[in-house]
Structures are given as structure tokens and as C-alpha cells.
Amino acid sequence: MKVNSDVTRCQGHGRCALLAPDVFDVDDDGKVVVLLAEVDDEHVAGVREAVTSCPETALELA
């Protein structure tokens, strides 16, 4: 499974980094940074929760 981010939509809420810190981080501007584009089984639950919790729908599973 892959996760994509749209930094133009990201408003820096940081929920993704809180819910899946091994997969997401935020940069100095507060925008999402995807650390693991290929998500393994260990991180799937956290990534799914992060994707559905993003208020700006800046994350997508592919």
C-alpha cells in the first residue's frame, strides 16, 4: 500500500504525525512529510486512521 500527500492542501494540523509517527512527520512550515511511501502491515492501521482523520483530505491511500 502506498500513501500520497498533497502539501498544497495540508494546513499543518499534524494529526497524521500523531497517529502514525513512523510514517508521517511535519516540516518546519508545519506541512506533512511522508517518511514511508510504501506502508507495511505494521503501520496500516495508523495510516488508515491518519488518512481518515485529516480535516483537509491531504492524504490518500493508493
Image (cartoon, rainbow, N blue to C red):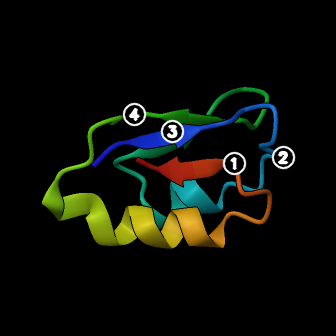
Q: Earlier in the sequence, mark 1 or mark 2?
A: 2
Q: Amino acid at mark 4?
A: Leu
Q: Say which element carries label 2.
A: loop
Label 2 CA crowd tier, 10 Å (few <14, some 14–19, many 20+): some
Q: Nearer the viewer, mark 3 or mark 2?
A: 3
Distance between the alpha carbons at the discs numbered 1 and 2: 9 Å
Marks 4,1: beta carbons within 8 A: no
Task: Work out whether residue 1 or residue 41 is closer to the camera in this orientation and state it.
Answer: 1
Marks 3,1: beta carbons within 8 A: no
Label 3 CA crowd tier, 10 Å (few <14, some 14–19, many 20+): some
Residue occupied by mark 4 = 35
Q: Amino acid at mark 3?
A: Asn
Q: Say which element carries label 1.
A: loop
Q: Position of residue 57 (x, y in %)?
A: 72, 57
Q: Position of residue 62 (x, y in %)?
A: 40, 47
Residue occupied by mark 1 = 58
At x 79% / y 28%, what residue is drawn?
Answer: 29
Disc number at residue 11?
A: 2
Residue occupied by mark 3 = 4
Task: Work out whether residue 56 or residue 62 is closer to the camera in this orientation and state it.
Answer: 62
Label 1 CA crowd tier, 10 Å (few <14, some 14–19, many 20+): some
Q: Amino acid at mark 2?
A: Gln
